[in-house]
Amino acid sequence: MTELNQPNTLQDILKWEQENRYSREIVTVNTGENLSLGAVIGKILKSIPTTGTLGSGTNGECTGVTGGLKTQIGTYKATCTTANGESQDGVWRIEAPDGTVLGDLVVTQGTSGTGTFADPQINLTISYATGYNSEGDYFTIEVAEGSGKAVEIDFSAVDGSQNAHGFLIDAVDAASDDVDGVAIVRDALIVPDDLVWPDGATSDQKAAALAELADKGILTRTEA
């Protein structure tokens, strides 16, 4: 006898939602995504550059910029407080958009100094040559608001898409262009076993995402 497997339907996942479709939201699914019904989604909330911009000075580079889980939207600043030289390390003060000093980056002494900085907010590398920088020179790193587009939740991301925003009520194929879809994003009762997760998602990651959904009022049977 041939065995038939029926795919999940929305009714398998969604057991209750607020009237007048209050639980739903139209989302724009980012180009390149091809998502199933029930896919848990995040939103791209931050746009983090890979380089800094030299605001004052003659030469040098700020490269290797990456964000962290605590990256703020706004302007990060790296300011030279001690110029590097033949026998002197350079020092750069790293400030967050809210004015908090995150720490110092040390550029090694010599004719082609380099230094790296790591923090839960921002990571970067500064390369400078002797004679090209002086106290007060600075780089800026502009972290802008993201596109707000929906993608499959990405637990390794730092742009906001690592957090659960909701789940799709129907499949969306945005492989070649942005496509609008509809997601449950608040006040609902669900069966979480039928949600669709990225390949390799761990039990702990799923539990954390379900807790984020619960904070939005999307509860499981045992939480209702």
Image (cartoon, rainbow, N blue to C red):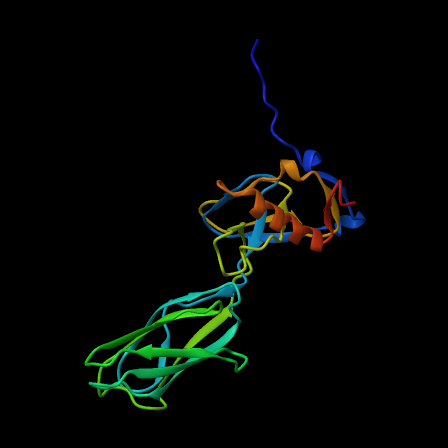
Nearer to us in this view, 74 or 112: 112
Q: Quadrant of the C terminus?
A: top right
Residue 142 drawn at (x, y percent): 45, 74
Vertical side of 67 occupied by 37: above or below: above
Residue at the limit of the structure toward the front, as seen here = 87
Q: Is residue 143 above or below residue 195?
A: below
Query: Taking 179 as reference, is 82 above or below it?
Result: below
What is the quadrant of residue 52 in the picture?
bottom left
Residue 79 horizontal/vertical position (percent): 39, 84
> Which residue extends farthest right?
19
Quadrant in which residue 116 is drawn: bottom left
Which quadrant of the rendered structure holds the N terminus?
Answer: top right
- How many numbered tags mark residues here? 0
**Residue at 27% over, 85% down:** 84
Toward the viewer: 65 or 181? Answer: 65
Image coordinates for residue 139, horizontal then vertical, percent: 38, 80
In the image: residue 16, left or right of residue 179? right
Taking depth in this image into account, of 189 and 96 the one nearest to the observer is 96
Q: Residue furthest bottom?
A: 135
